[in-house]
Amino acid sequence: MSDAASPPLCFAFTATVRDRGARPVDRIVTDNDLLRWLEVTGLLAGAPPAVEPAMAVRARELREAIHRAGLAVAAGTVPDGRDEATLNRWAARSSATRVLDRGRTTWAFPADRPVNAALALIAVDAVETLGGDDPIRTCAAPGCGALFVDTSRPRNRRWCSMATCGNRAKKANRRGSKDGIP
């Protein structure tokens, strides 16, 4: 993945917790937060669907299982069995289909449970990403903690994004800051 490319859907989802390594800020606290995030990512469009009670709680459980499994893969170990079971259970619920809508490919979810289907799609993406051939890395910038797929030619990328974390680290290193990453 080039630095300008979007992260996999599953890592965009884990990024709903900002500054994991410093002072974490959760962007999905309520069911409405979850709906907004799904809408912004393009997974849900139109009128907001009805949400099952505590759907944000289940979404956060999925998100954290993805994050823990990603950290394990990045460290070269096998994810915890409970996290794998969570991902596999959600992925098995997948009922999303690709459709052509106004000349563009998009996702279609069943009308009765679109939020569940969107979360299942995120789990499928996590299974494919974490089990894929490209290395999974954790951003080396202090305080970040974001996961990313390293598709750089030499497989030695260090930052989730050169535009943010990499740029800050290089600037700090040039200034001689001890917070910079050498």
Image (cartoon, helix red, strand yellow):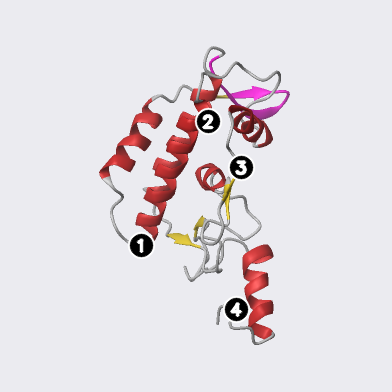
- Please tell me whether mark 4 or mark 3 is closer to you in this view: 3
- In this rendering, would 81 be left or right of 113? left
Q: Choose the circle earlier in sequence order: 3 or 2.
A: 3
Are circles 3 and 2 on residues that touch, CB within 8 Å? no
Q: Amino acid at mark 2?
A: Ala
Residue 102 magenta-highlighted: yes
Q: CA distance from mark 1 to mark 2?
A: 28 Å
At label 3, the amino acid type is Arg
Circle on res. 56: 2
Q: Which residue is mark 1?
A: 75
Q: Does residue 34 belong to the magenta stretch?
A: no
Query: Residue 180 has which mark?
Result: 4
- First-in-chain label (1 vs 3): 3
Residue with the mark numbered 3: 27
Rounded to the nearest angstrom, the CA distance separating label 4 from label 3 is 27 Å
Badge 1 crowding class, 10 Å Cα cut-off, few under 14, some 14 to 19, many 20 or more, is few
